[in-house]
Structures are given as C-alpha cells and as structure tokens.
Amino acid sequence: MTGALRRLRALPLRSRLALLVATAVAVAVAAVAASCWFVTRAQLEQQMDASLRSSKVDARYLSDLYNYCQGTSPLPPQSFTGYTVQLIDSQGTVCIAPKKAALKVSPADIAVAEGTQHDALHSARNENGTRMRVHTYAVWQISPAPGGTTGSIAVSIARPMSEINEPLSTLAWVLLVVSGIGVIGAGAAGLWVARTGLRPVDELTEAVEHVARTEDLTVRIPVEGEDEIARLSSSFNSMTASLASSRDRQAQLIADAGHELRTPLTSLRTNIELLARSDDTGRAIPPDDRKALMKSVKAQMTELASLIGDLQELARPDAANPGPLQVVGLHDIASTALERARLRGPELTIRADLTPWYVRGEPAALERAVVNVLDNAVKFSPPRGAIEVALRNGELTVRDHGPGIPAEELPHVFERFWRSPSARQLPGSGLGLSIVARTVQQSGGAVDLRPAEKGDGTVASVRLPGAPQPPPGL
C-alpha cells in the first residue's frame, strides 16, 4: 500500500487527476451496473414467479396424465408448451410425461400433496441437472381415477432458470462493455480536464522558473475569472510587483546614498589633500585658512557620520518589524528632545506647552522621530528666531518661523534623500523626515507638514493614538 502511494505521488499532477477521475468513474459505473444487474434479476424472478403462480394446468390433462402414469390410457399431446408438469402424491411418487426429466421432490412439495401446505415455490434441478423454478399446488380430486377412487395429489409446474440467466448474462456483458467504454472515456476526459484546468498552473510554473532563471520581475500572468487559479495568478502578480518595487527602491536607495556620500567625501578628500600638500611641500597654510579647513573637515565628518547613521536606521533588520512596544509618555519624550534642540540652537527661543499623553510605541524610535522634527525646525529657523512646540490631545505640533516650504514641494518632503533646492546648501541627508514618517506610521499615527496660518514658517504635526492617563499598573 505504501509503495503504491509512493508511486502515485511520483506521477505528474495531471496524471494523478486523470487517474483519480477514472477511478471515481469506474467505482460509480461499477456500482450502477451491479445495482442494475441485481434489480433486473429480481424483476425477472418476480415475473417468472408471477407467471408460474398464475398458470394452472387443465384438470382433464392432469387426469389423462395420472391415467397414463397408471398405464390405463395413452397421454394426449401436452398443451403447456415450455412448461414441465409432474404429479406428486403424498409418498413423493412422481408422475411425469414421457421424454420429460423428472424434478427433484422437496419436502415442501410432499407437504402440499399431503394437504398440510397450500402451495410451494422454490428452485430445483431435474434429472438432467437443469435448474428449474417450480411452483407446486394441491389437486384434491382426480377423476376418473383407477378403480373409481380419488387421490390426494399435488401438481408441479416448472420453467427452466435459463429463461432468466441467459438475459442476465447478456445484460452483464453489455454492462461490462459499456462500463469499460465509460471508464476509458472518463480517463480521457479527466486527462483533458486536468490539462485544461492546470494550464494556468503551468503558466505560473513557467513564470516562476523564468523569474528564477533571469530575475526578470516584470513577468505578469493574465488573470481570468475569479476562481482559485485566478487568485493564485493575482497573488503571484502582486508578489512580483512588490519585489520589483522593492528592488527599485533598493537600487534607488543605493544610488541616492552613493550620491549623498560623494559630496561630503569629495569635500573631505579635497581638504585633507590641501593639508597633506602643505605638510609635504613645507608651505604653511595661514592660521585662519588652516582653522577654516579643519572646521570644514569636522563639519564634513559630522555630516558623513549623520548620513551613515540615517542609512543604518533605514536599513536595520527590524525596520519593518519594530521591537516590543511599550506604553511611554509622549510628553516625556518631547521634553528630552527639547533639551537636545536647545543645545543645537542656543540662540533660538523655544517655547513648549506639553500636556500628558501616553502612547504605545518603541521609545528609542519615537525619540529619534521627535528629535528629527525639532532638528528640522532648528535648521530652518532664522537667527534668534522662535520655535513653538505644543502637545494637546495626542497631536504634537512644531512651528518654526523660517522661509517655509512651497506648496508644490510639500508632497515630496517625506521621500528619502529629497531636499528642497533652497536647503541643499544646509547640512543634512534628506532622510530625517523619511525616518519620522516611518516611525510614526509603525506606531499607528500620522505626520504632515503644512504652511503656518499666520506669518512665515512651517508647522510639523505628529498625531499618535493614546490617552491622557497611563493604563492601570504602569
């Protein structure tokens, strides 16, 4: 059994489907054919029994047959064509016409002759071994009987079972041939259905093999209908589209990162080459110029370190699956971020109005997001400018008084490495707001930038779901 199952699993899917369909049809056809054969046999037997019960031998013929058996008179021609007729007395003695094979007498026949049973219906074999269907009924008076007496006698009427068996045999052969044709046709139909039904699977297999061989993610499978195959094709198309988009974003990230890294590296190399040439040639650089070069080197190194940190933040493995979430106070995170912002812009006036608000998120990621928003405000604020920070009902707003962002540039501010043309001369990697958007979205919130309602500047709004009170037990 195990070997058969192993061989079955080794067959192609379409062959297994065709085999299963043919097997199922064969079982169904066999069940129907057997039922038909048994029902037909039962009907034929009932018809024969009814015919035997309704057939009665003429009393004169019975009298003549009895006299013939007693040797008192010749037997006239029999009028029951196709029937075997014999007489049975209470001692089991049989009287039958000449050239007829006597039937085996059963106890039921003797009981009918004795008068203890009305009639009997059974099967028996004659002297030639032919199987017969026999109906025996009582004949109480036979007249004239030898010596003028009457006798208690039963008469048996029999017909050969071949009248049923031969049609049944023919029917069995017909059913066998029809069943065989049906099974073969079912197997062919099953193979055709399997090939037709699995054609989309073949196309999907070819597409997957093509993608594995060529890494071409532009392959799409036509989706027809709404069945499982169509859903599978649609899912494959969605998967390849997602993979293609992911690969494009990855390529774009690498290209953008390379472009952004090239600027500080080029400037850093230029400054270092100037310092090295000064040492090699012995021509000292004026102190003010040397001080400016060192300051530029430090600035480029700081920018390079910041860019690498932002890239690591975007590429870290748990970026799509943040760590365990905790209930933290957004107002506490904002307070910590404000202290860092005041250190970076000591000449700025930063006013804060923070009401308690507790959210569920990753503390380190949320703090980095708030710091990035405040750094963005510090960077674009004019000297000795002001920044207003407020936290009310789960919405953290940071308003600066800088030049603002043109309306046509607002849709791009959260894209990776995007920087406003007016801000390209300022330090930064263009990744800060992208990190903010990703962190806030992972916490179930939303972030946007909009122009200030009055005056110049921009308002950054971060909305996070939460509550003004911490959960019990925190």
Image (cartoon, rainbow, N blue to C red):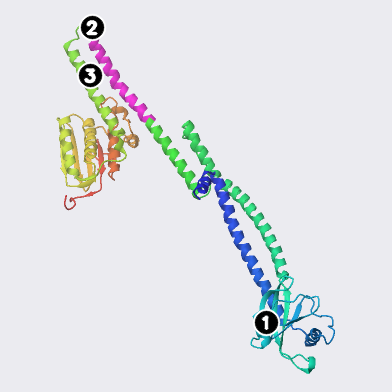
Kindly identify which residue carries mark 3: 297
Left or right: residue 277 versus residue 208 is left
Left or right: residue 336 versus residue 59 is left
Secondary structure state at the residue bearing disc 1 = helix
Please, which residue is most extreme toward the bottom here? Answer: 148
Residue 86 appears in the picture as rendered? yes
The boundaries of the magenta stretch are 251-277
Q: CA distance from mark 3 to mark 1?
A: 128 Å
Q: Quadrant of residue 12?
A: top right
**Which tag is nearer the camera, tag 2 or tag 1?**
1
Kindly identify which residue carries mark 2: 280
Left or right: residue 362 versus residue 207 is left
Kindly identify which residue carries mark 1: 109
Q: Residue at x 65, y 81 (%)?
A: 108
Secondary structure mainly formed by the magenta segment: helix
Q: CA distance from mark 2 to mark 1?
A: 139 Å
Image position, residue 262 (x, y; %): 32, 21
Q: Residue at x 76, y 80 (%)?
A: 85
Left or right: residue 34 versus residue 332 is right
Image position, residue 268 (x, y; %): 26, 18
Residue 452 appears in the picture as rendered? no
Q: Amino acid at mark 3?
A: Val
Q: Amino acid at mark 2?
A: Asp
Categorize mark 3 by other alpha carbons within 10 Å: few (<14), some (14-19), many (20+): many
